[in-house]
Amino acid sequence: QVHLVESGGGLVQAGGSLRLSCAASGRTFSNYDMTWFRQAPGKEREFVAAITWNGGSTIYADSVKGRFTISRDNAKNTMYLQMDTLKPEDTAVYYCAVGTIATMTFGSWGQGTQVTVSS
């Protein structure tokens, strides 16, 4: 079992930036693909980005492509989400998880970190 803890959320003005972190403990972090999802109030949880176990490949939702960058540091058991040019519609709770990109199957969800973008 992998235990995940997100951090780095906060309140930022539109056009600003935030960097989220997802720290892992437990089973070997580098064995897993990892992902970020988000959930806005009253909406379904939606995919944001994912990264392969070795960081060699990344995928993004169209809504964040070109603005967000996912990365990981296996030596630090940590994954990141650099969010630039933030928009009010990026406001959500952001969650990280481990799993398999090939089947888009993820689990061991963290508790989430709130991102609020003001206009």
Image (cartoon, rainbow, N blue to C red):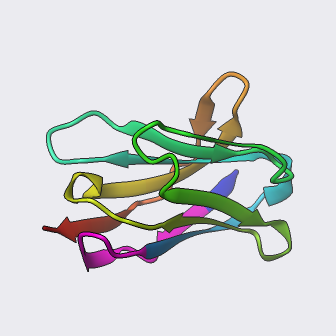
Q: Is residue 106 left or right of residue 38?
A: right
Q: The magenta stretch spans which residues? A: 4-17
Q: Picture quarter containing residue 75? A: bottom right
Looking at the picture, does residue 105 appear above or below residue 9?
Answer: above
Q: Is residue 65 magenta?
A: no
> At which x and y percent is residue 68?
51, 58
Tell me, yes or no, if residue 98 can be seen here.
Answer: yes
The number of discs equals 0
Q: Residue at x 31, y 77 (%)?
A: 10
- The percent position of residue 37, horizontal first and vertical second, equals 45, 46
Decide: is 119 above or below 35.
Answer: below
The one nearer the camera, 28 or 32, is 32
Residue 30 lies left or right of residue 98; in this view the side is: right
Q: Residue 73: where, in percent of width, then height?
A: 78, 69
The answer to which quarter of the image holds residue 102 is top right
The answer to whether any part of residue 28 appears in the image is no
Residue at the top extreme of this rendering: 103
Residue visible at 69% across and 61% down?
Answer: 71
In this view, the residue in front, 34 or 61, is: 61
Examine the structure image and report whether residue 5 is included in the region drawn in magenta.
yes
**Left of 72 or right of it: where is 56?**
right
- Residue at image point 50% right, 74% down: 19
Drawn side of residue 20 relative to residue 91, left or right: right
The x and y percentages for residue 109 are 51, 49
Q: In what quadrant of the picture does the C terminus appear? A: bottom left
Q: Residue at x 28, y 33 (%)?
A: 44
Work out whether 82 lies above or below 40: below
